[in-house]
Amino acid sequence: MTDIVLPPDTNYHGTIFGGNVMAYIDKVASITAMRHCRRQVVTASSDSLDFLAPIRTGEAICLEGYVSWTHHTSMEVYVKVEAENLLTGERRLTSQAYLTFVALDENDKPTPVPPVLPETEEERWNYKTASERFEIRSRRRELTKERLKKRK
């Protein structure tokens, strides 16, 4: 997905609002997950989003995503965000994120997803390190549940 960054999309620094980048990431990740499983999906978590560099007015925001790992009914999706200078064609990495989606059946219940087959070196690295991120997400989710119980 590619879009041009215009003045209404930016803050007083002339760079894209972080929330806009987050919305693009969720949209690209959702489409990626649905294409993988050919089912409706819901966002289960957005566990890592790193802003590495700004995207300025007049540049293009370019997003690419792929399913980096699957686990029964869930999928981890990696999204890479780049800025492109439209006059030179030069691109630079500006952010990256990992999101988790759950596939739903016709009754809105979790349903199994097909496995992922990594092809590139980057995809193989993300696949190899995914179980580590899965464990971190699981621990964080349990901590969140515990905190919510204590608030009641």
Image (spheres, rainbow, N blue to C red):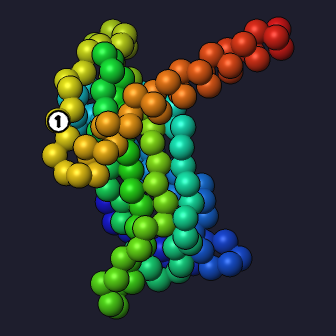
Q: Residue at x 20, y 26 (%)?
A: 115
- Can residue 66 be seen at all in this image of the molecule? no
Q: Residue at x 51, y 31 (%)?
A: 45
Give the quarter of the figure containing the N terminus. bottom left
Indicate left or right for 63 with 124 as reference. Answer: right
Indicate left or right for 135 with 126 as reference. Answer: right
State the image quarter where residue 85 is shown: bottom left
- Can residue 143 be seen at all in this image of the molecule? yes
Indicate left or right for 94 with 29 as reference. Answer: right
Q: Residue at x 53, y 80 (%)?
A: 57
**Residue that badge 1 annotates:** 117
* Furthest-right residue in this view: 151
Residue type at mark 1 is Leu
Question: Badge 1, how many Cα within 10 Å: few under 14, some, many 20+?
Answer: few
Q: Is residue 87 above or below residue 84?
A: below
Q: Residue 77 at x, y = what percent?
A: 36, 39
